[in-house]
Amino acid sequence: MKLVQVEIPKLVYWPLKVLLCIGAAYSLYTIAIDIDNGTITRRGIAYYLEAEPRTFYINLVKRFVIFSVLIWFGTSGTRKKEVSSNGN
């Protein structure tokens, strides 16, 4: 199975990877805090695990998908753009 890989210019390759991994770490941190509190706040509305479990878990899965995409592109989903011999 081939997953999406993006070619990035050499100049921004490592800074972008670091920023994506930091974003993934922050996303994982917010997931952990939300699970610990049992509350997810989205668009100013608080969803409680006890009151609205389906909405809570849907938002939790959404945040986990965002974390997964950030960690994929921060680790293996990017590669350096190769410059051909004729300069293109």
Image (cartoon, helix red, strand yellow):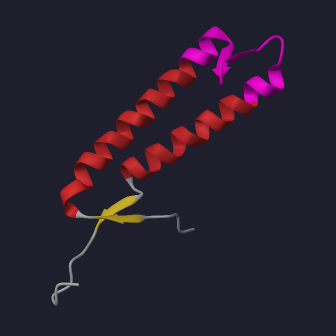
Vertical arrangement, residue 58 with respect to residue 7, above or below: above
Query: Is 37 included in the stretch rendered in magenta?
Result: yes
Q: Is residue 63 left or right of residue 8?
A: right
Whole-percent x, y for residue 24 in the image = 44, 36
Q: Is residue 41 magenta?
A: yes
Vertically, is 39 above or below 78?
Answer: above
User: Where 11 falls versus 39 (above or below)?
Assistant: below
Vertical placement of residue 4 versus 67, above or below? below
Q: Which residue does the image show at 63% across and 17% down from the upper left?
A: 35
Which quadrant, please, contains the C terminus?
bottom left
Q: Quadrant of residue 41?
A: top right
Q: Quadrant of the N terminus?
A: bottom right
The residue sitting at the bottom extreme is: 86
Where residue 30 sits in the image (x, y, percent)? 52, 22
Query: From the viewer's perspective, is 22 left or right of 53?
Result: left
Q: Residue at x 24, y 75 (%)?
A: 82
Q: Quadrant of residue 78?
A: bottom left
Residue 64, percent from left and from top: 59, 36
What is the count of numbered marks? Answer: 0
Q: Residue at x 53, y 68 (%)?
A: 2
The location of residue 48, given as percent across then percent down, is 75, 13
Q: Foreground residue, 74 or 41?
A: 41
Q: Would residue 88 appear left or right of 35 to someone viewing this image?
A: left
The single residue placed furthest to the front in the displayed view is 44
Residue range in magenta is 33-57
